[in-house]
Amino acid sequence: MVTSPLETRSLEYSYGEKDVLDGVSFELRPGEVLGILGPNGCGKTTLLRNLNKNLRPKVGCVLLDDADLEGMQKKDIAKKVATVPQTNEIGFAFTVREIVEMGRMPFQEAFRGNSSEDERIVDEAMEQAGVSCMADRYINTMSGGERQRTIIARALAQTPKVLLMDEPTLHLDISMQFEILDLVHRLSRESGLSVVIVSHDLPMVARYCDTIILLHDGRIFASGSPDEVLTTENMRTVFNVDARYERDERGNPTIRLYGACRD
Amino acid sequence: MSMSGRKWTLALLCAIALIALLFIFVLLDLSWAGNRTLSLGEVWAALTGNGSWGTDQIVNVRNLPRIAMGIFVGAGLAVTGGVMQAVFRNPLADPYILGLSSGASLGSAVAILFGISFVPLSVSQPLLAFVFCLMTMFLVYTVSRMGGGNVRTETLVLAGVAVAALISAVVSFLTYIAPSDEMQDIVFWSMGNLGGDWTEVTIVGCIVTAGVAIMLTQCRKLNAMMLGDAHAMDLGVDVARVRLMLLVVSSLVVAASVAFVGTIGFIGLVIPHIFRLILGPDNRLILPISTVGGAAFIIMCDYVAHAVAPLYGVLPIGVVTSLIGAPFFVYLLVSRRKVVGW
């Protein structure tokens, strides 16, 4: 049996008295693209931040290659798990290349510069995320989408086994949304990268994810393949939206949105 | 040449220029003899132990320890300021941001006013300043931890401001009720005054050197932390631990400086900014070059403070650092603000 690169077991998390996650368990398979869907405030981002030890679960655990994150150094986690956070405001004038090079940090000792291997990985990551042409531009002068792609390049430069993305389509142009998710999807197929995408973008998640977890009030409401999970009934309950999962005339899964439910 | 290659070359040129500047002002400062200026030959003779008794007194006893102290304090404050600005992602952060200067002032005022009968003031004052300084840092950190949860940098800054305000009020009160002689001592100390004997220079030198060495190993992590705590954590930086470690180390450096020379403002705030405006935000360049820059700047100011002695007497160094630094900084800020992003 293949071990899961990332697994959670009855994860619970709370901010003070407020329970945000309540018994979340799932297993990510190698090369799988997992979408965690839910309305705002359902605990998506909190769940994601538990997966790289930015937050520490109150109950339950997160296993990375069968090792409990609790016993792992942050640096060792960052060698396997890369994160693309939701907010990407960066006020300082680092160049794009400098930001992407930071992705090599977990692999480097203090005072050691970039090896030629590091350089090669950084070049490749920038190429993949489409930011090679802006390597010398300052991040604080760039648009939200350009910053997003820079951060994605940084995450790829970590050569991760697991990629966590928080609302990856939020700042991107429509065409760039497809490009980035195509890239992520391709990497998952070609190099076995496992991806967790947290989002409320129903059509994009339906199209690109192998498995979907619907999160509702901090619990897993439903999980499985998109056509199993994204039923009209489920979407009504969780998102309060009138929608239908279907395949378009090219055979791609999509969500047809009719409007909010009035009841 | 690539962008980063250009920056490293520029940084190297800056470093060479600063070392030259430092060297020149060390010589000028060494040659200061109150009513006259020693020649280079006399300074050299004194340094190598061949000078007359008079020049030996001037160069080796009066000027040299002061200059050595200045170099350590200037380097320490400049690097600490740079570290604090990166840790707090706040351009206004300086070495005293956690209320350290107010803590040290209180310690110093307590020593001047109440003293400890069996300990001479020259020992009790720096000792109490040092201890109060660290206690302040501890208090600020404890306050910002109250209410549970993670310590946010914003909370730390606010706790620092609050605690500093409280302590400053106590210092003002003590100054107000102090007899006029002691009052003058307290005020003079608070304006900063280089000096001290070789024992003091050695104590400050050891703490500053060790502290700066540790801080310089953290440049890359600080770069990640400047993007935001979450980014840094995503990149594998144990932000809480690194931040606490840096706060403790910088508090030790600041406490050591402030205990012996008082609060010297502006250096920690402005020197790192000046180099950021020239070289951009990369701490791998900013922190090392700030050590040289801080040292060069403080010695330059010390020379000016002494050179104007015929007019006003030797000025407190803190006055000069601000008088010279502020206009230069305003010029850089207006002309090159975009380069940093602040």
Image (spheres, coloured by chain):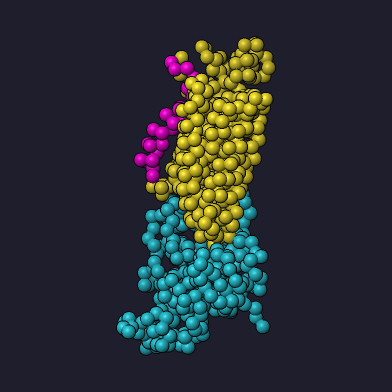
**In x, y percent, where is residue A157?**
54, 63
**In x, y percent, where is residue B93?**
47, 44
A158 over B50 or under it: above or below: below
Q: Is residue A193 visible?
A: no
A256 over B279 or under it: above or below: below
Using the image as rendered, state which of residue B177 and residue B74 is in the foreground: B177
Q: Is residue B101 left or right of residue A257?
A: right
State which chain is coloured cyan: A
Q: Start and end of the magenta stretch?
A: B311-337
Q: Which color was chain B given?
A: yellow
Using the image as rendered, state which of residue A53 and residue A217 is in the foreground: A217
B246 over A144 or under it: above or below: above
Q: Is residue B80 visible?
A: yes
Residue located 57% across and 74% down the image: A11
Q: For the image shown, how many numbered marks are present on the structure?
A: 0
Quarter of image, res B30: top right
Magenta stretch contains residue A159: no
Q: Of helix, strand and loop, which mostly describes the magenta segment?
A: helix
Magenta stretch contains residue B323: yes
**In x, y percent, where is residue A56?**
58, 66
